[in-house]
Image (tube, coloured by chain):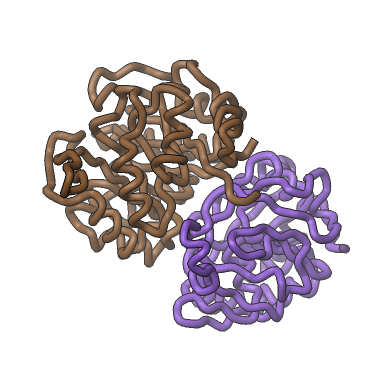
Amino acid sequence: MGLAKRIIPCLDVENGRVVKGVQFVDIRDAGDPVEVARRYNEEGADEITFLDITASHEGRDTTVKTVEKMASEVFIPLTVGGGIRECEDIRSMLNAGADKVGINTAAIFNPDFVKEAAERFGSQCIVVAIDAKQVAAATADKPARWEIFTHGGRKPTGIDAVEWAIKMTDYGAGEILLTSMDQDGVKKGFDLGLTRAVSDAVAVPVIASGGVGNLQHLVDGISKGHASAVLAASIFHFGEYTIGEAKAYMAAQDIEVRL
Amino acid sequence: MTKSVDVAVIDYGMGNLHSVSKALQHVAPNANIWIGDDPEIIKNATRVVYPGVGAIRDCIAEVRSRGLDQVIVEVAKTKPLLAICVGMQGLMQHSSENGGVDCLNVFPDKVTCFTDVLGPQHADLKVPHMGWNQVVKTSDHPLWNKIDSGARFYFVHSYFVAAASCSSVVGRANYGVDLVAMMAKDNIFAVQFHPEKSHTDGLQLLENFVNWDGAS
Protein backbone atom coordinates (compact mmCIF):
# COMPACT_ATOMS: atom_id res chain seq x y z
CA MET A 1 0.00 0.00 0.00
CA GLY A 2 1.18 3.53 -0.66
CA LEU A 3 0.29 6.63 -2.54
CA ALA A 4 -3.22 6.62 -4.01
CA LYS A 5 -4.00 7.59 -7.59
CA ARG A 6 -6.12 10.70 -7.54
CA ILE A 7 -9.52 11.52 -9.04
CA ILE A 8 -9.93 15.22 -9.69
CA PRO A 9 -13.26 16.67 -10.78
CA CYS A 10 -12.75 19.83 -12.81
CA LEU A 11 -14.99 22.87 -12.61
CA ASP A 12 -14.86 25.18 -15.61
CA VAL A 13 -16.21 28.39 -14.12
CA GLU A 14 -17.49 31.38 -16.04
CA ASN A 15 -18.89 34.43 -14.24
CA GLY A 16 -19.54 32.44 -11.08
CA ARG A 17 -21.20 29.40 -12.71
CA VAL A 18 -19.88 25.95 -13.53
CA VAL A 19 -20.11 25.35 -17.28
CA LYS A 20 -18.99 22.56 -19.52
CA GLY A 21 -18.45 22.68 -23.25
CA VAL A 22 -17.71 20.12 -25.92
CA GLN A 23 -14.33 20.75 -27.53
CA PHE A 24 -14.33 24.19 -25.90
CA VAL A 25 -17.66 25.30 -27.45
CA ASP A 26 -21.38 24.50 -26.88
CA ILE A 27 -21.48 25.43 -23.19
CA ARG A 28 -23.94 23.83 -20.69
CA ASP A 29 -24.64 25.18 -17.20
CA ALA A 30 -23.71 22.77 -14.38
CA GLY A 31 -24.45 24.76 -11.26
CA ASP A 32 -23.00 26.89 -8.47
CA PRO A 33 -19.27 26.15 -8.05
CA VAL A 34 -19.28 26.11 -4.24
CA GLU A 35 -22.26 23.72 -4.17
CA VAL A 36 -20.64 21.50 -6.77
CA ALA A 37 -17.28 21.47 -4.96
CA ARG A 38 -18.99 20.64 -1.65
CA ARG A 39 -20.76 17.70 -3.26
CA TYR A 40 -17.53 16.34 -4.75
CA ASN A 41 -15.77 16.79 -1.43
CA GLU A 42 -18.46 14.72 0.31
CA GLU A 43 -18.27 12.06 -2.40
CA GLY A 44 -14.54 11.65 -1.77
CA ALA A 45 -12.84 13.69 -4.50
CA ASP A 46 -9.09 13.86 -3.93
CA GLU A 47 -8.70 17.42 -5.16
CA ILE A 48 -10.72 20.05 -6.97
CA THR A 49 -9.53 21.89 -10.05
CA PHE A 50 -11.16 25.23 -10.75
CA LEU A 51 -10.57 26.60 -14.24
CA ASP A 52 -11.61 30.21 -14.56
CA ILE A 53 -12.73 30.83 -18.12
CA THR A 54 -14.10 34.29 -17.38
CA ALA A 55 -12.73 36.92 -19.70
CA SER A 56 -13.73 40.18 -18.00
CA HIS A 57 -12.08 42.01 -15.10
CA GLU A 58 -15.28 42.17 -13.06
CA GLY A 59 -15.52 38.42 -13.51
CA ARG A 60 -12.08 37.99 -11.95
CA ASP A 61 -13.31 39.56 -8.71
CA THR A 62 -16.19 37.07 -8.70
CA THR A 63 -13.63 34.30 -9.11
CA VAL A 64 -11.59 35.40 -6.11
CA LYS A 65 -14.75 35.50 -3.98
CA THR A 66 -15.83 32.07 -5.23
CA VAL A 67 -12.41 30.59 -4.45
CA GLU A 68 -12.53 32.14 -0.96
CA LYS A 69 -15.93 30.66 -0.26
CA MET A 70 -14.92 27.26 -1.62
CA ALA A 71 -11.72 27.18 0.41
CA SER A 72 -13.51 27.90 3.67
CA GLU A 73 -15.85 24.94 3.19
CA VAL A 74 -13.89 22.35 1.25
CA PHE A 75 -10.80 20.96 2.96
CA ILE A 76 -9.07 19.16 0.13
CA PRO A 77 -6.48 20.62 -2.24
CA LEU A 78 -7.75 23.24 -4.64
CA THR A 79 -6.02 24.19 -7.89
CA VAL A 80 -7.07 27.39 -9.64
CA GLY A 81 -6.15 28.03 -13.27
CA GLY A 82 -7.14 30.43 -16.01
CA GLY A 83 -5.76 33.93 -16.50
CA ILE A 84 -2.72 33.45 -14.24
CA ARG A 85 -0.21 35.81 -15.86
CA GLU A 86 1.95 37.28 -13.11
CA CYS A 87 3.08 36.60 -9.56
CA GLU A 88 0.44 38.98 -8.26
CA ASP A 89 -2.27 36.73 -9.77
CA ILE A 90 -0.73 33.76 -7.98
CA ARG A 91 -0.57 35.61 -4.68
CA SER A 92 -4.22 36.67 -4.87
CA MET A 93 -5.35 33.10 -5.65
CA LEU A 94 -3.23 31.61 -2.84
CA ASN A 95 -4.50 34.24 -0.43
CA ALA A 96 -8.06 33.42 -1.48
CA GLY A 97 -7.39 29.82 -0.46
CA ALA A 98 -6.04 28.03 -3.52
CA ASP A 99 -3.23 25.54 -2.89
CA LYS A 100 -1.90 25.40 -6.43
CA VAL A 101 -2.24 27.51 -9.53
CA GLY A 102 -2.39 26.34 -13.11
CA ILE A 103 -0.31 28.32 -15.60
CA ASN A 104 -0.98 27.80 -19.28
CA THR A 105 -0.73 30.55 -21.91
CA ALA A 106 1.54 32.79 -19.82
CA ALA A 107 4.11 29.99 -19.67
CA ILE A 108 4.20 29.82 -23.46
CA PHE A 109 4.70 33.56 -23.92
CA ASN A 110 7.12 33.85 -21.03
CA PRO A 111 8.61 30.55 -19.81
CA ASP A 112 10.70 32.41 -17.21
CA PHE A 113 7.45 33.23 -15.44
CA VAL A 114 7.23 29.56 -14.41
CA LYS A 115 10.76 29.71 -13.04
CA GLU A 116 10.06 32.92 -11.13
CA ALA A 117 6.78 31.55 -9.77
CA ALA A 118 8.34 28.27 -8.64
CA GLU A 119 11.18 30.07 -6.90
CA ARG A 120 8.84 32.45 -5.14
CA PHE A 121 5.96 30.16 -4.20
CA GLY A 122 7.55 26.71 -4.40
CA SER A 123 7.20 24.05 -7.10
CA GLN A 124 4.50 22.33 -5.06
CA CYS A 125 2.00 24.98 -6.04
CA ILE A 126 2.95 25.48 -9.68
CA VAL A 127 0.98 23.33 -12.10
CA VAL A 128 1.74 23.86 -15.77
CA ALA A 129 -1.31 23.18 -17.91
CA ILE A 130 -0.62 21.91 -21.40
CA ASP A 131 -3.25 21.79 -24.13
CA ALA A 132 -2.01 19.53 -26.90
CA LYS A 133 -3.24 18.19 -30.24
CA GLN A 134 -1.83 15.39 -32.28
CA VAL A 135 -0.07 16.74 -35.39
CA ALA A 136 1.37 13.48 -36.69
CA ALA A 137 0.24 9.91 -36.13
CA ALA A 138 2.76 7.20 -35.31
CA THR A 139 4.30 5.50 -38.32
CA ALA A 140 6.59 2.50 -38.66
CA ASP A 141 9.73 4.60 -38.19
CA LYS A 142 8.45 7.63 -36.28
CA PRO A 143 6.50 8.02 -33.02
CA ALA A 144 3.40 10.21 -32.91
CA ARG A 145 3.81 13.95 -32.31
CA TRP A 146 1.71 16.38 -30.36
CA GLU A 147 1.94 20.16 -30.31
CA ILE A 148 0.85 22.85 -27.91
CA PHE A 149 -2.12 24.98 -28.92
CA THR A 150 -3.40 28.18 -27.33
CA HIS A 151 -6.61 30.22 -27.49
CA GLY A 152 -8.95 27.33 -26.90
CA GLY A 153 -7.16 25.15 -29.41
CA ARG A 154 -7.26 27.60 -32.31
CA LYS A 155 -3.64 28.75 -32.36
CA PRO A 156 -0.77 26.35 -32.98
CA THR A 157 2.55 27.26 -31.37
CA GLY A 158 4.82 24.76 -33.09
CA ILE A 159 6.03 23.58 -29.66
CA ASP A 160 6.36 19.83 -29.15
CA ALA A 161 4.22 18.76 -26.17
CA VAL A 162 6.68 16.25 -24.68
CA GLU A 163 9.67 18.60 -25.00
CA TRP A 164 7.60 21.38 -23.48
CA ALA A 165 6.61 19.24 -20.48
CA ILE A 166 10.27 18.41 -19.84
CA LYS A 167 11.26 22.06 -20.12
CA MET A 168 8.51 23.18 -17.75
CA THR A 169 9.53 20.69 -15.08
CA ASP A 170 13.14 21.87 -15.48
CA TYR A 171 11.79 25.37 -14.86
CA GLY A 172 10.18 24.26 -11.62
CA ALA A 173 6.67 23.02 -12.43
CA GLY A 174 5.65 20.57 -9.69
CA GLU A 175 2.90 18.94 -11.71
CA ILE A 176 1.64 18.80 -15.31
CA LEU A 177 -2.05 19.06 -16.18
CA LEU A 178 -2.19 17.52 -19.62
CA THR A 179 -5.28 18.04 -21.78
CA SER A 180 -5.83 16.45 -25.15
CA MET A 181 -7.73 18.96 -27.24
CA ASP A 182 -8.65 16.26 -29.71
CA GLN A 183 -10.40 14.27 -27.01
CA ASP A 184 -11.77 17.05 -24.78
CA GLY A 185 -15.51 16.70 -24.30
CA VAL A 186 -15.97 13.91 -26.84
CA LYS A 187 -16.10 11.17 -24.16
CA LYS A 188 -14.06 8.56 -26.00
CA GLY A 189 -11.28 8.37 -23.42
CA PHE A 190 -7.96 10.09 -22.85
CA ASP A 191 -5.36 10.33 -25.59
CA LEU A 192 -3.36 7.51 -24.02
CA GLY A 193 -0.41 7.89 -26.37
CA LEU A 194 0.01 11.51 -25.39
CA THR A 195 -0.53 10.79 -21.70
CA ARG A 196 2.02 8.01 -21.63
CA ALA A 197 4.59 9.95 -23.69
CA VAL A 198 4.47 12.87 -21.25
CA SER A 199 4.15 10.81 -18.04
CA ASP A 200 7.15 8.68 -18.95
CA ALA A 201 9.22 11.73 -19.91
CA VAL A 202 8.88 13.79 -16.71
CA ALA A 203 9.67 13.09 -13.07
CA VAL A 204 6.70 15.03 -11.67
CA PRO A 205 3.09 13.82 -11.44
CA VAL A 206 0.95 14.12 -14.58
CA ILE A 207 -2.81 14.66 -14.47
CA ALA A 208 -4.55 13.20 -17.50
CA SER A 209 -7.39 15.33 -18.83
CA GLY A 210 -9.78 15.45 -21.75
CA GLY A 211 -12.10 12.78 -23.02
CA VAL A 212 -13.46 10.77 -20.10
CA GLY A 213 -16.80 9.20 -20.99
CA ASN A 214 -16.89 6.16 -18.71
CA LEU A 215 -15.11 4.67 -15.71
CA GLN A 216 -12.86 2.38 -17.74
CA HIS A 217 -11.36 5.51 -19.28
CA LEU A 218 -10.20 6.57 -15.81
CA VAL A 219 -8.56 3.18 -15.27
CA ASP A 220 -6.87 3.35 -18.69
CA GLY A 221 -5.46 6.81 -17.93
CA ILE A 222 -3.61 5.33 -14.96
CA SER A 223 -2.72 1.86 -16.16
CA LYS A 224 -2.05 2.58 -19.84
CA GLY A 225 -1.36 6.30 -19.75
CA HIS A 226 0.84 6.11 -16.60
CA ALA A 227 -0.83 9.20 -15.15
CA SER A 228 -0.71 9.91 -11.39
CA ALA A 229 -4.16 11.46 -11.42
CA VAL A 230 -7.19 11.60 -13.68
CA LEU A 231 -9.35 14.64 -14.24
CA ALA A 232 -12.92 14.64 -15.49
CA ALA A 233 -15.83 17.02 -15.64
CA SER A 234 -19.00 16.09 -17.46
CA ILE A 235 -19.32 12.47 -16.26
CA PHE A 236 -19.54 13.86 -12.72
CA HIS A 237 -21.36 17.14 -13.33
CA PHE A 238 -24.39 15.65 -15.00
CA GLY A 239 -24.88 12.79 -12.56
CA GLU A 240 -23.72 9.88 -14.72
CA TYR A 241 -21.34 8.69 -12.02
CA THR A 242 -20.42 9.73 -8.49
CA ILE A 243 -16.80 10.03 -7.40
CA GLY A 244 -17.46 7.08 -5.07
CA GLU A 245 -18.59 4.88 -7.96
CA ALA A 246 -15.50 5.86 -9.93
CA LYS A 247 -13.23 4.95 -7.03
CA ALA A 248 -14.96 1.63 -6.39
CA TYR A 249 -14.55 0.76 -10.07
CA MET A 250 -10.87 1.69 -10.04
CA ALA A 251 -10.24 -0.22 -6.81
CA ALA A 252 -11.85 -3.32 -8.36
CA GLN A 253 -9.28 -3.02 -11.17
CA ASP A 254 -6.46 -3.04 -8.60
CA ILE A 255 -5.76 0.66 -8.75
CA GLU A 256 -4.93 2.08 -5.34
CA VAL A 257 -7.39 4.83 -4.45
CA ARG A 258 -8.45 6.64 -1.29
CA LEU A 259 -11.80 5.13 -0.32
CA MET B 1 -1.65 44.78 27.12
CA THR B 2 -1.16 42.19 24.41
CA LYS B 3 -4.33 40.35 23.54
CA SER B 4 -4.36 36.62 24.15
CA VAL B 5 -5.48 34.35 21.33
CA ASP B 6 -6.48 30.68 21.46
CA VAL B 7 -4.45 29.63 18.43
CA ALA B 8 -1.76 31.72 16.76
CA VAL B 9 -0.90 30.68 13.21
CA ILE B 10 2.54 32.03 12.34
CA ASP B 11 2.45 33.86 9.01
CA TYR B 12 5.93 34.67 7.76
CA GLY B 13 4.87 35.77 4.29
CA MET B 14 5.17 32.55 2.32
CA GLY B 15 2.50 30.96 0.15
CA ASN B 16 -0.90 29.91 1.35
CA LEU B 17 -0.99 29.81 5.12
CA HIS B 18 -4.60 30.90 5.29
CA SER B 19 -5.90 27.39 4.62
CA VAL B 20 -4.63 26.36 8.03
CA SER B 21 -6.48 29.11 9.87
CA LYS B 22 -9.64 28.46 7.87
CA ALA B 23 -9.55 24.78 8.77
CA LEU B 24 -8.86 25.56 12.45
CA GLN B 25 -11.79 27.96 12.50
CA HIS B 26 -13.94 25.23 10.97
CA VAL B 27 -13.13 22.72 13.75
CA ALA B 28 -13.18 25.34 16.52
CA PRO B 29 -15.84 27.87 15.51
CA ASN B 30 -15.76 29.64 18.87
CA ALA B 31 -12.00 29.86 19.21
CA ASN B 32 -10.06 33.01 18.56
CA ILE B 33 -7.82 31.97 15.67
CA TRP B 34 -5.22 34.59 14.79
CA ILE B 35 -2.77 34.65 11.90
CA GLY B 36 0.22 36.96 11.78
CA ASP B 37 3.87 37.56 12.68
CA ASP B 38 3.68 39.60 15.91
CA PRO B 39 6.09 37.84 18.32
CA GLU B 40 4.23 39.06 21.42
CA ILE B 41 0.88 37.66 20.30
CA ILE B 42 2.53 34.36 19.35
CA LYS B 43 4.27 34.11 22.73
CA ASN B 44 1.02 34.81 24.56
CA ALA B 45 -1.17 32.44 22.56
CA THR B 46 -2.52 29.29 24.19
CA ARG B 47 -1.46 27.21 21.20
CA VAL B 48 0.75 27.87 18.20
CA VAL B 49 0.77 26.51 14.65
CA TYR B 50 3.94 26.75 12.56
CA PRO B 51 2.83 26.02 9.01
CA GLY B 52 4.98 26.01 5.93
CA VAL B 53 4.96 25.83 2.18
CA GLY B 54 7.70 26.46 -0.32
CA ALA B 55 11.44 26.06 -0.08
CA ILE B 56 13.23 25.77 3.25
CA ARG B 57 15.87 28.46 2.66
CA ASP B 58 13.30 31.20 2.15
CA CYS B 59 11.08 29.88 4.94
CA ILE B 60 13.90 29.91 7.47
CA ALA B 61 15.20 33.24 6.17
CA GLU B 62 11.77 34.84 6.57
CA VAL B 63 11.34 33.34 10.03
CA ARG B 64 14.76 34.66 11.12
CA SER B 65 14.34 38.11 9.53
CA ARG B 66 11.15 38.59 11.53
CA GLY B 67 12.83 37.46 14.74
CA LEU B 68 10.47 34.49 14.91
CA ASP B 69 13.16 31.81 15.17
CA GLN B 70 13.71 32.49 18.87
CA VAL B 71 9.96 32.75 19.42
CA ILE B 72 9.39 29.31 17.88
CA VAL B 73 12.20 27.76 19.92
CA GLU B 74 10.72 29.28 23.07
CA VAL B 75 7.17 28.18 22.23
CA ALA B 76 8.49 24.67 21.54
CA LYS B 77 9.49 24.46 25.20
CA THR B 78 6.33 25.83 26.73
CA LYS B 79 3.01 25.26 24.95
CA PRO B 80 1.23 23.04 22.42
CA LEU B 81 2.92 23.57 19.07
CA LEU B 82 1.83 22.04 15.78
CA ALA B 83 4.31 22.25 12.90
CA ILE B 84 3.14 21.42 9.39
CA CYS B 85 5.12 20.32 6.32
CA VAL B 86 8.01 22.76 5.81
CA GLY B 87 7.24 23.96 9.35
CA MET B 88 8.05 20.46 10.58
CA GLN B 89 11.25 20.43 8.51
CA GLY B 90 12.13 23.85 9.96
CA LEU B 91 12.24 22.27 13.44
CA MET B 92 14.95 19.81 12.39
CA GLN B 93 18.65 20.36 12.74
CA HIS B 94 19.49 20.64 9.05
CA SER B 95 17.97 20.29 5.59
CA SER B 96 19.83 19.37 2.42
CA GLU B 97 17.44 21.53 0.36
CA ASN B 98 18.80 24.65 -1.40
CA GLY B 99 22.36 23.42 -1.04
CA GLY B 100 22.04 22.89 2.73
CA VAL B 101 20.23 25.02 5.31
CA ASP B 102 20.62 25.04 9.09
CA CYS B 103 17.18 24.87 10.68
CA LEU B 104 15.91 25.60 14.20
CA ASN B 105 17.37 22.46 15.78
CA VAL B 106 14.42 21.63 18.01
CA PHE B 107 14.75 18.02 16.84
CA PRO B 108 18.17 16.49 16.08
CA ASP B 109 17.01 14.95 12.78
CA LYS B 110 18.03 15.82 9.24
CA VAL B 111 15.92 16.48 6.15
CA THR B 112 16.90 14.73 2.92
CA CYS B 113 15.60 14.57 -0.65
CA PHE B 114 13.74 11.63 -2.15
CA THR B 115 15.81 11.85 -5.32
CA ASP B 116 18.99 11.31 -3.27
CA VAL B 117 17.78 8.08 -1.69
CA LEU B 118 15.38 6.45 -4.14
CA GLY B 119 17.25 3.94 -6.26
CA PRO B 120 16.59 2.83 -9.84
CA GLN B 121 14.07 0.28 -8.57
CA HIS B 122 11.87 3.27 -7.70
CA ALA B 123 12.21 5.05 -11.04
CA ASP B 124 8.41 5.01 -11.34
CA LEU B 125 7.95 7.08 -8.18
CA LYS B 126 7.30 10.71 -9.05
CA VAL B 127 8.84 13.50 -7.01
CA PRO B 128 7.28 15.52 -5.38
CA HIS B 129 5.51 12.87 -3.32
CA MET B 130 2.10 14.33 -4.03
CA GLY B 131 -1.26 12.96 -3.00
CA TRP B 132 -2.99 10.83 -0.39
CA ASN B 133 -0.79 8.34 1.39
CA GLN B 134 -1.42 6.09 4.36
CA VAL B 135 -0.04 6.92 7.77
CA VAL B 136 0.65 3.97 10.05
CA LYS B 137 0.55 4.52 13.79
CA THR B 138 3.88 3.69 15.39
CA SER B 139 3.10 5.15 18.79
CA ASP B 140 0.02 6.30 20.70
CA HIS B 141 -0.60 10.00 21.05
CA PRO B 142 -3.62 12.21 21.91
CA LEU B 143 -3.53 13.62 18.36
CA TRP B 144 -4.35 10.12 17.01
CA ASN B 145 -7.71 10.33 18.81
CA LYS B 146 -10.56 9.08 16.54
CA ILE B 147 -8.14 8.50 13.65
CA ASP B 148 -7.40 4.96 12.45
CA SER B 149 -3.92 3.72 11.80
CA GLY B 150 -3.59 3.57 8.02
CA ALA B 151 -5.72 6.67 7.44
CA ARG B 152 -4.80 8.67 4.35
CA PHE B 153 -3.52 12.23 4.48
CA TYR B 154 -2.52 14.67 1.75
CA PHE B 155 1.23 15.03 1.20
CA VAL B 156 3.11 17.32 -1.13
CA HIS B 157 6.86 17.44 -0.62
CA SER B 158 10.20 16.47 -2.15
CA TYR B 159 12.19 16.46 1.11
CA PHE B 160 11.54 14.26 4.11
CA VAL B 161 12.81 13.00 7.46
CA ALA B 162 13.74 9.32 7.44
CA ALA B 163 11.67 7.27 9.89
CA ALA B 164 14.44 4.73 10.52
CA SER B 165 16.74 7.19 12.30
CA CYS B 166 14.07 9.26 14.05
CA SER B 167 13.34 8.57 17.72
CA SER B 168 10.28 10.85 17.87
CA VAL B 169 8.17 9.28 15.12
CA VAL B 170 4.52 8.53 16.01
CA GLY B 171 3.29 7.91 12.46
CA ARG B 172 5.11 6.85 9.32
CA ALA B 173 4.33 6.62 5.62
CA ASN B 174 6.10 4.77 2.85
CA TYR B 175 7.15 6.19 -0.49
CA GLY B 176 9.98 3.96 -1.59
CA VAL B 177 11.42 4.70 1.84
CA ASP B 178 9.84 4.96 5.31
CA LEU B 179 9.34 8.61 6.11
CA VAL B 180 8.21 10.48 9.20
CA ALA B 181 4.57 11.48 8.75
CA MET B 182 3.98 12.50 12.38
CA MET B 183 6.48 13.14 15.14
CA ALA B 184 6.05 14.26 18.72
CA LYS B 185 8.07 15.26 21.74
CA ASP B 186 6.54 16.65 24.92
CA ASN B 187 4.33 19.57 23.85
CA ILE B 188 5.43 19.52 20.19
CA PHE B 189 3.61 17.71 17.40
CA ALA B 190 4.80 17.88 13.81
CA VAL B 191 3.34 16.49 10.60
CA GLN B 192 4.78 16.17 7.11
CA PHE B 193 1.35 16.12 5.44
CA HIS B 194 -1.23 18.89 5.29
CA PRO B 195 -4.02 18.19 7.82
CA GLU B 196 -5.83 21.32 6.62
CA LYS B 197 -6.17 19.65 3.21
CA SER B 198 -6.81 16.10 4.40
CA HIS B 199 -10.60 16.12 4.62
CA THR B 200 -12.23 14.38 7.60
CA ASP B 201 -9.13 12.83 9.18
CA GLY B 202 -7.12 16.01 8.73
CA LEU B 203 -9.83 18.08 10.37
CA GLN B 204 -10.00 15.51 13.19
CA LEU B 205 -6.27 15.91 13.79
CA LEU B 206 -6.65 19.70 13.97
CA GLU B 207 -9.57 19.30 16.37
CA ASN B 208 -7.43 16.99 18.49
CA PHE B 209 -4.71 19.64 18.52
CA VAL B 210 -7.12 22.39 19.56
CA ASN B 211 -8.21 20.17 22.47
CA TRP B 212 -4.70 19.04 23.41
CA ASP B 213 -3.12 20.20 26.67
CA GLY B 214 0.39 19.50 25.42
CA ALA B 215 0.92 16.38 27.49
CA SER B 216 1.78 13.19 25.65
Task: Using the rendered view, name the quadrant where residue A53 is placed.
Answer: top left
Residue B53 vs residue B124, the one in the foreground: B124
Please give the name of the residue rendered at 58% of the width and 54% of the height, measured from the top-left corner: B155
Instruction: Please provide percent x and percent y for residue A26.
Output: 25, 18
Tell me if A203 is positioned left or right of B121 in this view.
left
Compared with B14, B108 (above or below) is below
Colour assigned to chain A in the rendering is brown
Q: Quadrant of the N terminus of chain B?
A: bottom right
Residue A33 vs residue A197, the one in the foreground: A197
Colour assigned to chain B in the rendering is purple
Tell me if B190 is positioned left or right of B62 in this view.
right
Please give the name of the residue rendered at 29% of the width and 32% of the height, measured from the top-left corner: A54
Q: Quadrant of the C terminus of chain B?
A: bottom right
> Is residue A161 visible to us here?
yes
Instruction: Please provide percent x and percent y for residue A155.
Output: 12, 39
Instruction: Please provide percent x and percent y for residue B127.
Output: 47, 60
Please give the name of the residue rendered at 31% of the width and 38% of the height, measured from the top-left corner: A179
Q: Residue furthest front?
A: A140
> Is residue A65 visible to us here?
no
Please give the name of the residue rendered at 17% of the width and 42% of the height, measured from the top-left corner: A139
Task: Using the rendered view, name the quadrant where residue A124 is placed.
Answer: bottom left
Compared with A47, A167 (above or below) is below
Numbered circles on residues, count: 0
Compared with B111, A186 (above or below) is above
Instruction: Please provide percent x and percent y for residue B91.
Output: 65, 73
Residue A67 vs residue A46, the one in the foreground: A46
